[in-house]
Image (cartoon, rainbow, N blue to C red):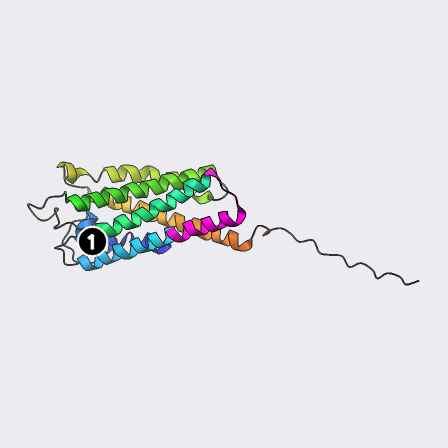
Amino acid sequence: MAAAALLYNGWLLEFVLPTGLDPRHSYVSELYAADQPLRWLFGGIESVCAVLVGGGALLAGGAASGIRSRTGIRSRADWWARSGWWALLGLALSSLADVYLPMRCAPSVEPGCEAVHPWHTATSALAHFFVFASMALLGRAAATDAPRMPLIRRWGTWVLAPALPTAVCTVGPLIGRPGWHGIPQRAHLTLVGVWFALLAAELAGSSRQTARGPGAGRERVPEVAQPAADGG
């Protein structure tokens, strides 16, 4: 998940590579539009990121299920958390579909290129749905079972709150109002990267706690040797 946090913002490479796109007025997905010269690079980064997110979601969900099966304890927070990890898997699959059903062209620089590419627009909408679902569901799980996910409980809302309006501000070209949508979209992608980093930190903390075991931190009282019995 930590690696995914970095790769999800691979669009930063556009500042050092000759993409021909203006970050202020272009979608990030234009970087891997079908006719773009660097499609293989940016599409590859997006694909690897999706695989990492999907793998992380499966591992985290599987580990949580294993703990529940060993302890026999199930709670409402378990359902919320499990649903949140499934949402992240949905995000991963939607992101892969986004790459393999790309825009045919880059509407920000090519006259006559429509911003709405039906299949690509649908997969992008699904990716947005699943990322917000993961934030909401895992945030609810953290609120229901606060000791288990303290970082998400404390910071999750602070990521979700600005991520939603920045996503809404990217729809301009889809409703015939292009221009300046690139800035809020890149802000949104940065926030999703922060969300992945938050999940990575939470999972790392949970792994350390599990490795220490339930008795970790308890002070052991040394045994006092008893004197040998007197034979007389």
| 230 magenta-colored | no
User: Considering depth in this image, is 71 or 231 the residue closer to the camera?
Assistant: 71
Residue 224, picture quadrant: bottom right
- Report whether 116 appears left or right of 133: left
Location of residue 10 with respect to 166 vertically, above or below: below
**According to the image, label 1 marks what residue?**
100
Counting from the top left corner in percent of width and height, residue 133 is at 33, 40
Crowdedness near tag 1: few (<14), some (14–19) or many (≥20) residues, C-alpha within 10 Å: some
In the shown orientation, is residue 57 left or right of residue 95? right
Quarter of the C terminus within the rendering: bottom right
Residue that appears at 35% across and 43% down: 134
Identity of the residue furthest to the bottom in this view: 231
| Image: 55 above or below 82 | below
Q: Residue at coordinates 15% horizontally, 51% vertically from top-left? A: 21
Q: Nearer the viewer, residue 76 or 227?
A: 76
For the record, the magenta segment spans 58-76
Q: Quadrant of residue 168?
A: top left
- SS at circle 1: helix
Q: Amino acid at mark 1?
A: Tyr
| Between 167 and 118, the one nearer to me in the picture | 118
Left or right: residue 107 compared with residue 155: left
Magenta region includes residue 72: yes
Where residue 131 sits: x, y (%)? 31, 43
